[in-house]
Each structure stands twice: as structure tokens, then as C-alpha cells.
Amino acid sequence: MNGTSFSLATFSGGPAGSFAAIVLGERAFSVAGVYPSYRDGARGKAGPLTATGDIQDMLEGWDHNFPVLQEIVAFIEDEGADSDRFADVSAPMEGLRALPPVQRPGKILNAAQNFQEHVDEMIRAGNTPGDGPKFTGDRSTSMPYLFLKASTVLAGANDDIAIPRGMERIDWEAEIACAIWKGGKRIAADRALDHIAGWMTTNDVSCRDLNMRPDRPALKSDWYGGKSHENFAPMGPVMVPKAFVSDHMNLFIRLTLNGEVKQDGNTSQFIYTPEEQIEFASNVSGVDVGDIFVCGTCGGVGMGTGTFLKVGDTMETEVEGLGKMTNRLVEDAD
């Protein structure tokens, strides 16, 4: 079995509109375009793909589809990635628009305050209820805290993000995300990795104006108003299969704003691991194929210093080995 690393992505800008792609280096190969030649050739020992046009559909039966994708990569390499055979079914990534790799997640589950530095900065900033005990990062007295973000707010890795009208405190949160290929209930943390297909870079853009509602102080956090404005979940540009991420618990997470480093953390600093988050969620409602877990941000968000995004700003968000996103803030023209 070929062991060459590759990633998967969803692009638009090709002759056939949006398409699922295998990414090798800086070149994208349409899965639907390459697959017929692979299928009709001497290869095909792993059997047929169950889907070619949509990564989310490929997640169904990922344990079968991933080896087939590996064979397709070997076929591309045997033929030569620059071969004329692939001229009409491949293109440089730079000429394409990256869409979110997984287009139709059932649930986006985000982890709140899952790095100690972020816990501490949010307490200092007063973005926690004024009365009663505060979570200080102590695992012995707590459990994972997840909130839902609307799946309709997904954006591409290089899409613009409009600042919502009337809002002034728009913030950033660089994070790593994972996509689920196998659903289940009551999943033990030590088996949770078996349910993950791959990893992605993301940014949990947040509207701090509404996170803590001054008109409804007794209700504490407004997760919908604070998190689910349009394009507030840029993701991608690729999904890297789990097999090619040697240690998801030792990857840098970095965000720059107009070239200045604002966040520089590491997944080794998680309070609760992605596996523990999956265990927690699976004991509440279960997890489903295509669900996305966004696993928590490190210290350095704007709320910590009272620094917020404005029109014309550019964020670059990167997770080690998973790709970089570049998103510009624009005025809401709608």
C-alpha cells in the first residue's frame, strides 16, 4: 500500500464547478476526474470508492474509502503528476477557491476555555459571570464544556469575513478541528481516535458584543449571538487524514493579525483532549458521521487585551502540518 501523504479539499473554480480533490504538494486532482482512469486500470485492489464528488459522502465508509484514495495517489504518482493524462482533471491550488473541506456537517461542537492561558485571560478580561465560582482550569472539579456553532457559518480558508452591523468587538480564536467518520454513543476516550477521519485548521471567530449579554445578565453566555454570524467559521484549506498526523497532541497553533503574532500555542496544552471531548459529546447526544469538533483555542485572543478586529485587518491562522488560512475583515454590505 502506498504511503505517500496527501490531503483532501473541496474547491471551486474548476471547469466542473465545485469538486472534491486530492491535494499533492500544491496541485489539486479532482477525485471524480481521476477515478475513472484509476478504476479502469490495473490497480483497484482496494475496491471502488463509495463517493467521488463530496468529502462528506466519502466519510461514510471511510475505513474502506481511505485505502482506495491511497491507491489513487499511487496511480497518480505512477503515471506522473504532471502527465498530460491529468491535464484536464487537475490544477494548481493557487488558481482555485478553497471551500470548507466538509460542506454539510450535522453538528459543529466547539470546546470553550480549553487552554489554561485562555482560561486565565478571559477571567482577567471579565468575560465570565461576575457572581459565583469561576472555572480556573482544574480538571478535578469540571468536565469538557462544548457549545454548538451553526454549520451554516462555515467559510473557506481565504474568504472575507464581514463585521456584523452594529458590532464592535469581533475576536479571533485559532483552533484545530477534526471530522468524524464513524458515529456512535458512549464512546470511550481511548477509542475515540477510531472515529476521526482527519484534521483541519479553523478559526472560531467570535462577537464579544453578544457573548455576555448585558440585557440578559442572568442567562450568562449567548453562544448563538456570539459565534454564529455569517462566515464566522473559516476552515481548511485541506483536511489531512488522521494517518498522516503523527501526533495531534503536539502541533503548534498560530495566528497573526496584520503580520503580528497574536496566538502561539501547542495542542499539548489542551485541558481536555479531543478524545475526551468526543467521549463527553457521545454521552449527551451521540456523534454522527460528518460532525466536526473544534477543540479549543490557546491564549492570545483579542478579548485578553481589548484588541478587536476592524475593517481591513487580515488574519492568518495556521496549525502545524494542516495548512494556513488568510481571512480579511470587510464591511457588511448586505
Image (cartoon, rainbow, N blue to C red):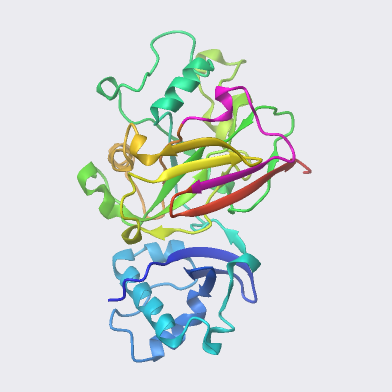
Q: Nearer the viewer, residue 78 or 183?
A: 78
Q: Which residues are magenta?
A: 299-318
In the shown orientation, is residue 212 left or right of residue 311? left
Q: Residue furthest front?
A: 260
Asked if residue 311 is positioned above or below residue 78 in the image, the reply reads: above
Is residue 264 found left or right of 12 in the rendered image? left
Q: Quadrant of residue 217?
A: top right
Could you tell me which residue is drawn at 64 percent across and 26 percent down?
Answer: 307
State the residue at coordinates (65%, 76%): 15
Quadrant in which the C terminus is drawn: top right
Q: Quadrant of the N terminus?
A: bottom left
Residue drawn where x is 63% and y is 42% of the image:
259
| Quadrant of res 257 | top right
Magenta stretch holds residue 97: no
Q: Is residue 311 magenta?
A: yes
The location of residue 329, given as percent across then percent down, is 70, 42
Residue 182 in percent (x, y) is at 31, 56
| Dominant SS in magenta | loop
Q: Is residue 188 visible?
A: no
Report the front residue among 261 and 207.
261
The percent position of residue 245, horizontal first and vertical second, equals: 35, 56
Quick one: which residue is furthest to the top in this view?
131
> Which quadrant of the figure has residue 18?
bottom right
Give the answer, above or below, for where 198 lies relative to 234.
Answer: below
Residue closer to the observer: 12 or 59: 12
